[in-house]
Image: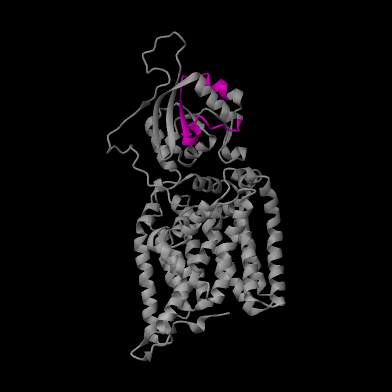
Amino acid sequence: MSGQSRGSGRFGTGVVPVAVPMAVMAGIALWGLDRGGMWGDESVTFLVAQRTVPQIWRLLHDVDAVHGLYYLFMHAVLTVHPGEVVLRLPSVCAATATAGLVAALGVRLAGPRVGLWAGLLYAITPMTGHYAQEGRSYALVAAGVAGATLLLLRAVEAATARAWWPYGTVVALTCLLHELAVLVLCAHALTLALLRVPRAVWSGWGCAAGAAVLVLLPLVWVSQGQSGQVSWLGTPGWDRAERLVRNFAPGPAGVAFWGSLPLMALGLRARRPAAVALPLLLVPPGVLMTVSQVRPLFHDRYVLYSLAGASLLVAAGAGRVAGALGRVRFDGRRVRVGGRRVRALLGVTGVLALIVTFLHQLPVHRQDRSAAHRPDNLAAVSALARSRMRPGDPVLFVPSVGRLAALAYPRGFRQVRDIALRESAPRSGTLWGREATPEELRHRLASVDRVWVVAETYALDPGWSPRDPVERAKRAVLAEEFTVREEHARDGVVLRLYVRKAPAGTPSTDDPPGSATTVRLPANHPEVPRARPRPGPW
């Protein structure tokens, strides 16, 4: 199984080709880690992980069971120090480990040179850096899958029953972090078929995979009752497939993207690397996209772990190119691949090419370190609320998920009152609290003449029709009894001041009903939102 004998002489017996990608990945992941604000999903991790274990357990019975193990893990992490940087450090460590594991796979399959290139390719891919800085489980799942793939190769080589238990254990833990990681078993089955392993290997793998699936079944059963959480996902088409291909490349466009495609095709000619990398690259996304035609479940981040297959294939293709160049004749003399100088020159050339690729994608990496590049910035929303709301003002969140800004950054909402909240999130066993009934909400709003509304932009669309009767009551009361006085926007969230409409026939010295006063500030004022970069392909 090992390709180390083909390698690069003293350039590395496996340590250097693994250590260098890990160091590069750690540097990229730590760069700009404290971006000054969490977005919605990160804030959920931050808030849930700070609850007590019984409170987390109660929450998982109703929502987010698929992330249960991750929340318990993060509960232990945030016990050390609850902060945004600590929240993201597990993902940093996981991405660093994954880069090393991808390099180790390349070393085992095609030698140290290909292993070094594969690990570096994984480290400099923008999608990798994106999820290496997220307080979610996806980087950890990618590390688990890469580790399980390496253990698969070791178990095949060892050909003993005992060698399969580490593999089965890692697969089970990875699937408990996110149940869609179970699709890697399909990829590994295809790998074994392509390698034409004997029947005894199939038997050992089947026992390990079956044990992992049995461990996962209770989680699958519970999560089926919570499938409404992914109802926002749409049916993926060819555009989503193209976007995934671009995300898996060292760069989503330009020379980096188009140059990686022919190298990936050449990598298919390297039998053992292709037998491992191609199933990992194609099977999980392909299966999930196919299932999503009937029941939408696909999102790029759910198959982040497949990116390792792309890096391995591109590196294997580059290895074949390097091998061909090493056989070129000069002045009638054949320069052999085994020549130390030639190997060193080709290895350095490959590393320089990767450095140029990274520098070419540097604007993408730099843009991704901005909090404004995430779907929302709850810290900015809280700061805007603090600058506009007066002590005692009532505030209404439309929809209720907008309350995450107040929960994650309570300073901006400390002196206002949440007029719709009936029971707090930890006590109610929910993510953002339990709200009053429609009748109670109408009664509460009837007692106020002004109310601040923190709304997602889609919730202000007249065509938005929420299923929740409480959300419908919010929209109805605001439309019937209130009018907009002020409006401020920040990072995808709109802050509006609603005032009660004057009775019919009553002269008003205020703005006419239905008009909104948008406060305009100088361009250099700190509260003026800066131009938001266009979101990346993921």
Q: Identify the residue at image location x=45%, y=76%.
A: 319
Image position of 234 (left or right of 86): right
Q: Give residue 440's quadrant in the image.
A: top right
Q: Position of residue 38 (x, y in %)?
A: 45, 46
Residue extending farthest to the front is 332
Q: Where is residue 13 in the image (x, y as percent from the top left)?
A: 47, 81
Q: Which of 143 and 428 is in front in this view?
A: 143
Image position of 173 (left or right of 273): right
Q: Identify the residue at image location x=46%, y=70%.
A: 263
Q: Give residue 186's quadrant in the image.
A: bottom right
Q: Identify the residue at image location x=70%, y=73%.
A: 202
Report the span colored magenta: 441-468
Image position of 456 (left or right of 215): left
Q: Position of residue 150 (x, y in %)?
A: 57, 71
As drawn, 339 above or below 218? below
Q: Nearer the viewer, residue 98 or 238?
A: 238
All told, the count of numbered labels is: 0
Q: Where is residue 422 in the image (x, y as percent from the top left)?
A: 58, 30
Q: Nearer the viewer, residue 45 or 398?
A: 398
Q: Does the magenta stretch include residue 222?
A: no
As drawn, 351 above or below 243? below
Q: In which quarter of the image is the N terminus?
A: bottom right
Residue extending farthest to the top is 505
From this viewpoint, is residue 114 visible? Answer: yes
Q: Nearer the viewer, residue 352 or 146?
A: 352
From this viewpoint, is residue 144 visible? Answer: no
Q: Does the magenta stretch include residue 464?
A: yes
